[in-house]
Amino acid sequence: MISGGMPIHDAGQLLLVGVPGPELDSDSARLFRKIQPGGFILFGRNIQSPGQLRKLLDDLRDLSDVEPILTIDQEGGRVSRLKLIGNEPPNAQQLRDRDDLELIKRHGDITGRLLRVFGFNLDLCPVLDISYDDEADNSLRGRCYGRTVPEVIAKAGAFNTGLRAAGILSCGKHFPGYSSAGMDPHHELPFLDRSREKMESEELAVFRAFTDSVDSMMIGHIAISGLDEIRRPASLSPAIVRDLLRKDMGFGGLVMTDDLDMGAILNHFGFDETMRLGLEAGNDMLMICHRVEMALAAKSAIEPLGDALCPALESVARSKARLSPPSVFTVESFQKIDAEIRELRIATLGESEADTRSPEDGKRSPVELY
């Protein structure tokens, strides 16, 4: 046994899985009870109304023998799952351009309180990528807090401080940084020919600044020549996860892959191979967002690793010891916080622009950004 009463070889605790729909159907409930995933990630497909969302999270918590990580991508702008039932928060770039650290910290605080009302305990942000091109077609448009190392550190740091103070764990992403890439990893694996020295002076300088202040790190799907000479995706690379992030940078929090259902991985690796490589690289949790039916196969693929799973299981247990309980839910409590989001939009964008929402508003796209 390890801390929290968790069986040492309960491999399901190393999986962070999606949920098929807005309600917990009997087949999914049976699967999750059997596997006991360490956490669940929700998307637009899971959100219909405030009451429905809270019930779904309560149901997921009820079927879990160990308190689960319950997470979502609630950044702001187009990557705001909860805008489907409320106001859309300003995105990182809009807050960046407003240049008000207190406003950004307020965004973090509001986001944290909003998530706790529904029962979430971890938010998959802040984005720590540097924006070298605000119009780049690499899925990061509008999502970056700065164009320089100091700007990202200051502004993403303000959000991170507000979020954590509200009782929600944070996640720095997408390590080691992929904003220089011109390709979207949702569709294909980007490759970046960039030296270690260049990365250290820019992207890695940001992540180093957050190693003691974010609770988790998400590893991106990008191959970088200067960090892994055999060009493995960062998410499957021991050189990047184990040697750079863990040993060199000294990060002691939870480490998770980005979604292993992305084209960057699917197009190049087999399923069992991906699961094994992900843990051997040094990740603690493997993210499977869309092929939920593969969760049992994922657990079966990693169970043979045996004692090699112990460090990851210990890391998950340490993180779970820090999870905050959900706030009391009422529709009125949600509406009060939602009104604060509206006020935040006005303070950031001005009254005339506050009702202009991102183009993806209301759509449950088959490719949701994260």
Image: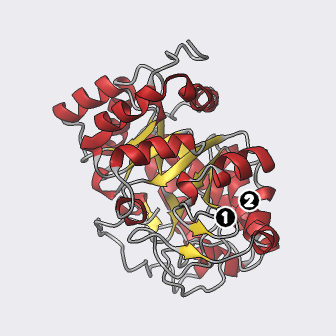
On screen, residue 309 above or below 115: above
Q: How many marks?
A: 2
Image quarter in which the N terminus is found: top right
Q: Label 2: how many residues lie within 10 Å, few (<14), some (14-19) or many (20+)?
A: many
Name the residue at 52% across, 35% down. 327
Do tag 2 and tag 1 residues touch (Cβ < 8 Å)? yes
**Residue 329 x, y percent position in the rendering:** 43, 37
Circle nearer the viewer, 2 or 1 = 2
**Which residue is under mark 1?**
128
Q: Residue at x 34, y 31 (%)?
A: 300
Q: x%, y% of residue 323?
A: 59, 32
Specify whether 150 is left or right of 56: right
* Picture quadrant where residue 232 is located: bottom right
Q: Residue at x 29, y 23 (%)?
A: 34
Q: Nearer the viewer, residue 268 or 318?
A: 268
Q: Secondary structure under badge 1?
A: loop
Mark 2 secondary-structure assignment: helix
Vertical comparison of 351 with 176: above or below: below
| Identity, as a three-letter code, of the amino acid under mark 1 | Leu
Residue closer to the observer: 97 or 103:
97
Tell me the distance, in whole angstroms, between the alpha carbons under discs 2 and 1. Answer: 7 Å
Percent coordinates x, y for residue 87 in the rendering: 44, 65
Nearer to me, 12 or 96? 12
What's the amino acid at mark 2?
Answer: Phe
Residue located farthest toward the front when viewing the structure as drawn = 230
Q: Which mark is residue 207?
A: 2
188 with respect to 75 (left or right): left
Name which residue lies at 50% across and 47% down.
115
Number of residues whose C-alpha sits closer than 10 Å to that of mark 1, classed few (under 14), some (14–19) or many (20 or more):
many
Does the rendering let one see residue 150?
yes
